[in-house]
Image: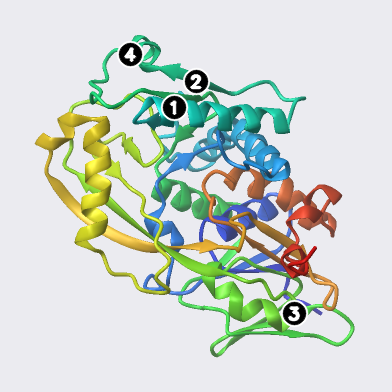
Amino acid sequence: MTDYDVIVAGAGMVGAAVGYGLAGLNRRVLMLDGSDTDLRAAKANFGLVWAHGKGINDPAYQRLTIQACEAWPEFAARLEEETGMALAYERKGGLHFCLSDADLSARAAQMDVWHAQTPDLAPSAHVLNRDELIRRFPSMRLGAEVAGATLGDLDGQVNPMRLLAAMLAAYLRRGGALRSNHAVTAIHPLPGGGFEVVAGGFRARAERVLIAAGLGSSALGPMVGLDVPLRPLRGQILVTERLAPLLPVPASGLRQTGEGTVMIGVTQEDVGFDLSTTTEGAVRMTRKALRILPDLAKAKLVRQWACLRVMTPDGNPVYASSVSHPGADIATCHSGVTLASFHAGAYAEALASGGLPDSLRIFHHERFNVPKNQ
């Protein structure tokens, strides 16, 4: 006998979304989470729901991201209706600024490649030169170096902390069980099928187990034949005081929140598990931001923090089922906000049905085991 249908190890962006979806499919779900001091990628989430430019040279990831962004309006509306919590989600497009003519030309060529990968999909990104950019967004006061930008129609933004809180609240409303301060320490396959999951002195049994513990997945995966190579990537973020509107839509590395603060980021630093903030990182981020929006020079910075992203060798997600321990799965990515609609929808449905679709096979971690000479 088992206590649950599924035990989810991890209640961050990925685990919470999948758990929320499974609970809505009448599955008995237990979510086990660590403490607030754990290495949570959600702490440094920029809050972008972003498609354009993702998956260059990887059409499968491109399609997955576009699919997730297209599902976001319905996903957000349903979550807000279930919880009464405002997510501050909006989809008005997203910009990638270019700071020279050469940069804009290179970005345009990149978007041509991106669109050519999926010729059956309608183009969702457009190149805007400086004049077109100003006509489209007349309220923006751009720096002299801004040559233009690319605009993604499917892109948007959300308050990431409200999103996580809403998914957990909705999960509990749907009958899911959650134990905080219960980081999973062991997963034991049971004779005849199923698993016993250990979290310190707590134990529970389930027919299936999903590992969605971020960087902690590296320790748990091998227990059930899912050894996924993961590494931390530090991201630093700055936030200003509240300002009058100056950025009408989010941009890559720059967005104004619904409260008026401006978030500036994000660094990509391969420094292991070092969570320090640095002056060098702050200077690099602010210099670029000021080249785009000079009015930010008048703003006060009120906070700087860092967190660790969960990265695979190629930067793409991993979705895999264990061959040696049927019923065990792993899901990890660094785009937990963008892919939340997919995790709560199609991915949760696949888990509930007992197996992943063929379309997700390309995201199996065995792709990293190909010999280098092949």
Say which amino acid is labelled 3. Answer: Val
Q: Please identify, in this view, whether the residue under mark 4 or under mark 1 is nearer the observer.
A: 1
Q: Which of pointers 1 and 3 lies earlier in the amino acid sequence?
A: 1
Which residue does the image show at 62% across and 27% down from the upper left?
Answer: 112
**300 vs 275: above or below:** above
Which residue is drawn at the image coordinates 33% and 70% (left, top)?
A: 275
Give the alpha-carbon distance from disc 1 to disc 3, as whole Å: 47 Å
- In the figure, is residue 201 to the left or right of 140? right
Residue for badge 2: 127
- Tell me the CA gap for discs 1 and 2: 8 Å
Residue that carries the numbered disc 4 in the rendered image: 134
Q: Amino acid under label 1?
A: Leu
Residue 21 visible from this viewpoint? yes
Which of the marked residues, 2 or 4, is nearer the chain's N terminus? 2
Under circle 2, the secondary element is strand
Q: Of circles 4 and 3, which is in front?
A: 4
Whole-number angstrom distance, CA of label 4 to CA of label 1: 15 Å
Q: Position of residue 205 (x, y in %)?
A: 72, 79
Quadrant (top left, top right, bottom left, bottom right) of the C terminus: bottom right
Nearest the viewer among 51 and 32 is: 51
Instruction: Kindly identify which numbered label has been placed on residue 224.
Output: 3
Q: Name the element at disc 3.
A: helix
For badge 2, the amino acid type reads Val
Picture quadrant where residue 193 is located = bottom right
188 versus 88 height, above or below:
below
Asked if residue 169 is positioned above or below residue 186 in the image, the reply reads: above
Q: Are marks 1 and 2 in contact (CB under 8 Å)?
A: yes
Please name the residue shown 26% across and 38% down the image. 289
Image coordinates of residue 321 in percent, x first then y, are 79, 66
Looking at marks 1 and 2 on the same chain, the residue that comes earlier in the sequence is marked by: 1
